[in-house]
Image: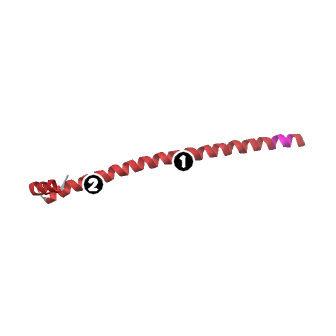
Amino acid sequence: MNVNDWITLISTVGFPIVMCGAMGWYVKHVSDQHREDMTAERTQHANEVKATTDAINNNTLAIQKLTDYIERTKVYER
């Protein structure tokens, strides 16, 4: 919209109504942007949780292998 369109709209329906419409559009725009940001953040968080879970599982396997090795070593020492 150019300046003349805004002036025509304001003179036709009034400044408060035009501003209410503009503020409504702004609130919707900000809300949509926030929703998109939160979706991206949730996706990133899910990826981080998966990476952490994989690391914990790998550590658990390593500890189990070490425990098994220690147990086998104890049997041979007896």
Q: For this rendering, which residue is in front, 45 or 67?
A: 45
Which amino acid is tagged 2? Answer: Tyr
For the image shown, how many numbered marks are present on the structure? Answer: 2
Please give the residue where the numbered disc 2 appears in the rendered image.
Answer: 26
Q: Is residue 54 left or right of residue 76?
A: left
Q: Is 58 contained in the magenta span?
A: no
Q: Is 72 contained in the magenta span?
A: yes
Is residue 24 placed above or below 46 in the rendered structure? below
> Residue 46 location, x and y as percent?
51, 45
Local packing at callout 1 (Cα closer than 10 Å; few below 14, some 14-19, many 20+) is few
Residue at 67 percent of width and 46 percent of height: 59
Local packing at callout 2 (Cα closer than 10 Å; few below 14, some 14-19, many 20+) is few
Residue at 28 percent of width and 54 percent of height: 27
Which amino acid is tagged 1? Answer: Glu
Magenta span: predominant SS is helix
- The answer to the question of whether label 2 and label 1 lie on touching residues, with beta carbons closer than 8 A, is no
Q: Is residue 35 left or right of residue 62?
A: left
Q: In this view, does 38 lie to the left or right of 25?
A: right
> Residue 30 location, x and y as percent?
32, 53
Span highlighted in magenta in the image: 70-75
| Closer to the eye: label 2 or 1 | 2
* Label 1 residue SS: helix
Please give the residue where the numbered disc 1 appears in the rendered image.
Answer: 48
Q: How far apart in space, not on screen, are marks 2 and 1 (Cα)?
A: 33 Å
